[in-house]
Amino acid sequence: MVIDFTKLSPRDAYNWMADTITPRPIAWVSTVSPEGRTNLAPFSFFNGITGNPPTLMFSAVNNRSGERKDTVRNIEATGEFVVNLVTHAHTGQMNACAALLPYGESEFDKFGIAPAASAQVRPPRVEAAPVAFECRLHTIVPVGEGAGAASVVFGRIVSAYVSDAVLAAGGGIDPALLDTVGRLGGENYVTTRDRFSLKRPDRP
């Protein structure tokens, strides 16, 4: 089977990508508007980029009217955001934040999600998230136009909150305690509870 993506509708192209590029980590992104109203939304086109300088990215797809997400609008205006990691225990709250609320209405307030003050940026982190990366905007790259197009947001990590509850005895992250989830296609998710290890090849 060969799929000619140049002949697909944007919706079909997205579905094929979402169903096959798996599992995808989830960025639960918190921002504030210039007026100080908080926003919290999940994005599953997300990953780390480099440690030099510490940088991550997420992609926010425009809504069906072709408008940019509130998250992107807030980051453009303030230059700051927080990426909270999503655990298995908090998937319900994360999923609720995918609802379309009027601009300025807070998902923290609407869905009873407790915020906590960040160390170096204005947007709060999700208090229950075991890891939260505080970021300052590096750049936003628009890809495409209209509905289904996206804004790819690159952020410089300036600080991170890591809960002591997810640390192993040696001080690093214990993946079993972190218990993050990943996104599959459609309404499907996956946990990180089934793990295996491989020794990496020697490198000079």
Image: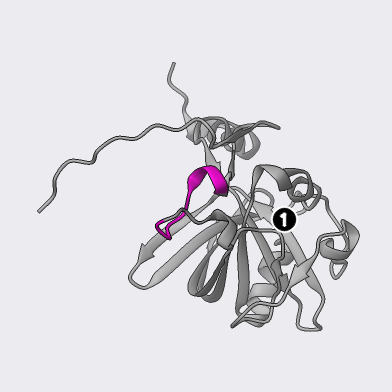
Q: Nearer the viewer, residue 151 or 197?
A: 197
Q: Is residue 85 left or right of residue 30?
A: left
Residue 166 part of the magenta segment: no
Q: Position of residue 77 (x, y in %)?
A: 68, 80
Residue sitting at the far front: 169
User: Which image quarter: residue 130?
Assistant: bottom right
Q: Position of residue 178 (x, y in %)?
A: 56, 49
Q: Residue at x 70, y 65 (%)?
A: 71
Q: Is residue 109 left or right of residue 76?
A: right
Visible residue check, residue 151:
no
Q: Which residue is mark 1?
A: 66
Range of magenta residues = 170-177
Percent from the top left, x then y, of residue 121?
62, 81
Q: Quadrant of the C terminus?
A: bottom left
Name the residue nearer the viewer: 198 or 144: 198
Residue at 65 percent of width and 77 percent of height: 118
Q: Which corner quadrant holds the N terminus?
A: top left
What residue lies at 87% left-to-right and 56% top-to-bottom?
Answer: 111
Q: Main secondary structure of the magenta part?
A: loop
Residue sitting farthest toward the top? 1
Asked whether 171 falls inside the magenta stretch, the response is yes
Q: Nearer the viewer, residue 173 or 69?
A: 173
User: How many residues crowd around disc 1 within 10 Å: few (fewer than 14), some, or many (20 or more)?
Assistant: some
Q: Amino acid at mark 1?
A: Gly
Dot 1: what SS?
A: loop
